[in-house]
């Protein structure tokens, strides 16, 4: 099995096995939709099943819904961004874990998941997919010469009301003290694992460009990819492909942003534009923007980078910006 080298640096299955050590969650709390796990080692057995599986020409994403229940999406061509680009077929599945095996089905397909592999069957045909842990090619990208390091875990000096966790991650609900006009931005984020939450209640935040154009942050792993899901720019556009990785995986946004232009009388002559890469894949290209609700501005003038607090434990690291 081989993942697309131009997009991903796949991890070894040995490394994957080390990531999947789990212990049972507290039964009194685990069914609460607001329960959020920040460490896979405390996330329960379902966390070891959810994730991505791949073989040549096929991809499978398995979404944990709590209590041993799962949804799945089977992709022809490969995983999103690594063979599947939204133009080939995908098939939705559902199922549960029984007696140590996770069984999913939908349409003509049946899937058995056991020991970090998934067997996909259609009539007399079958294919084996191995579990993979993909990583953005820009994860950990160092700030180049001339960049402003907005956050590296050492302080929150660039952030109004910014706070850090004990392990030096940036919390939600803060904006940069400085306003920016035209720039390149690198930002890394991690959504919590919330198996009993659904939709907009599942790891929700947002990256506001210019304090008024929201690129969604959400655990929308395995969903269709709407303008209010991860990678979508709310009210403006859905992503070309849903590149959201499983919860608790560090993900990246790489952004080129050009602010709106005005004439001498203050009238907009050209709207703001952006190109966004999610986990190394272009999901918006030269997209013209209109302001979205929830930010601190709507005047289309240069603004801050705002990280929305939607009540969920989304965290950030390695944020830098280059002014143009």
Image (spheres, rainbow, N blue to C red):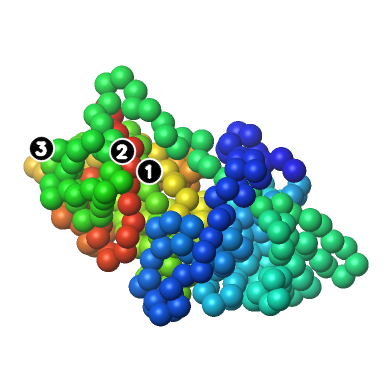
Residue 6 in picture, x, y percent from top left:
60, 33
Residue 233, can we see it?
no
State how far apart marks 3 and 2 are (Cα): 34 Å
Element at badge 2? strand
- Residue located beneath label 1 in the image: 188
Residue 105 in picture, x, y percent from top left:
72, 74
State how far apart marks 1 and 3 are (Cα): 38 Å
Residue 171 in picture, x, y percent from top left:
26, 52
Residue occupying image coordinates x 40% and y 39%: 254
The answer to whether residue 315 is left or right of residue 276 is left
Residue occupying image coordinates x 59% and y 76%: 69
Which sits in the foreground, 153 or 260?
A: 153
Corner quadrant of residue 118:
bottom right
Residue occupying image coordinates x 74% and y 67%: 112
- Residue located beneath label 3 in the image: 264
Label 1: few (<14), some (14–19) or many (≥20) C-alpha neighbours in 10 Å: many
Do residues under tags 2 and 1 come within 8 Å of each other at their CB atoms?
Answer: yes
Do residues under tags 1 and 3 come within 8 Å of each other at their CB atoms?
Answer: no
Element at badge 1? strand
Residue 125, can we see it?
yes
Q: Which mark is residue 319?
A: 2
**Camera-side mark, 1 or 3:** 1
Where is the C terminus found, in terms of image quarters?
Answer: top left
């Amino acid at each position: 099995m081989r993942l697309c080298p131009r997009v991903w640096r796949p991890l070894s299955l040995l490394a994957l096995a080390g990531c999947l050590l789990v212990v049972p969650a507290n039964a009194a709390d685990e069914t609460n939709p607001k329960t959020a796990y920040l460490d896979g080692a405390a996330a329960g057995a379902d966390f070891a099943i959810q994730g991505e599986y791949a073989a040549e020409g096929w991809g499978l994403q398995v979404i944990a819904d709590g209590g041993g229940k799962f949804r799945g999406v089977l992709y022809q061509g490969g995983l999103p961004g690594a063979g599947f680009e939204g133009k080939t077929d995908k098939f939705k599945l559902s199922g549960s874990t029984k007696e140590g095996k996770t069984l999913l089905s939908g349409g003509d397909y049946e899937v058995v998941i056991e020991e970090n592999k998934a067997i996909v069957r259609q009539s007399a045909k079958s294919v084996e997919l191995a579990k993979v842990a993909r990583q953005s090619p820009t994860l950990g990208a160092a700030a180049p010469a001339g960049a402003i390091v907005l956050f590296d875990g050492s302080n929150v000096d660039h952030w109004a009301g910014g706070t850090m966790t004990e392990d030096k991650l940036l919390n939600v609900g803060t904006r940069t003290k400085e306003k920016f006009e035209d720039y390149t931005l690198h930002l890394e984020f991690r959504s919590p694992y919330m198996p009993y939450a659904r939709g907009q209640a599942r790891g929700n935040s947002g990256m506001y460009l210019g304090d008024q154009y929201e690129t969604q942050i959400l655990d929308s792993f395995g969903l269709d990819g709407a303008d209010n899901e991860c990678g979508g720019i709310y009210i403006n556009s859905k992503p070309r492909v849903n590149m959201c990785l499983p919860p608790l995986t560090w993900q990246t946004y790489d952004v080129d942003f050009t602010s709106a232009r005005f004439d001498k009388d203050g009238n907009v002559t050209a709207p703001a534009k952006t190109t966004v890469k999610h986990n190394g894949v272009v999901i918006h290209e030269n997209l013209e923007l209109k302001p979205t609700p929830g930010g601190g501005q709507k005047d289309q003038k240069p603004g801050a980078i705002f990280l929305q607090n939607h009540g969920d434990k989304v965290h950030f690291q390695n944020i830098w910006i280059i002014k143009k």
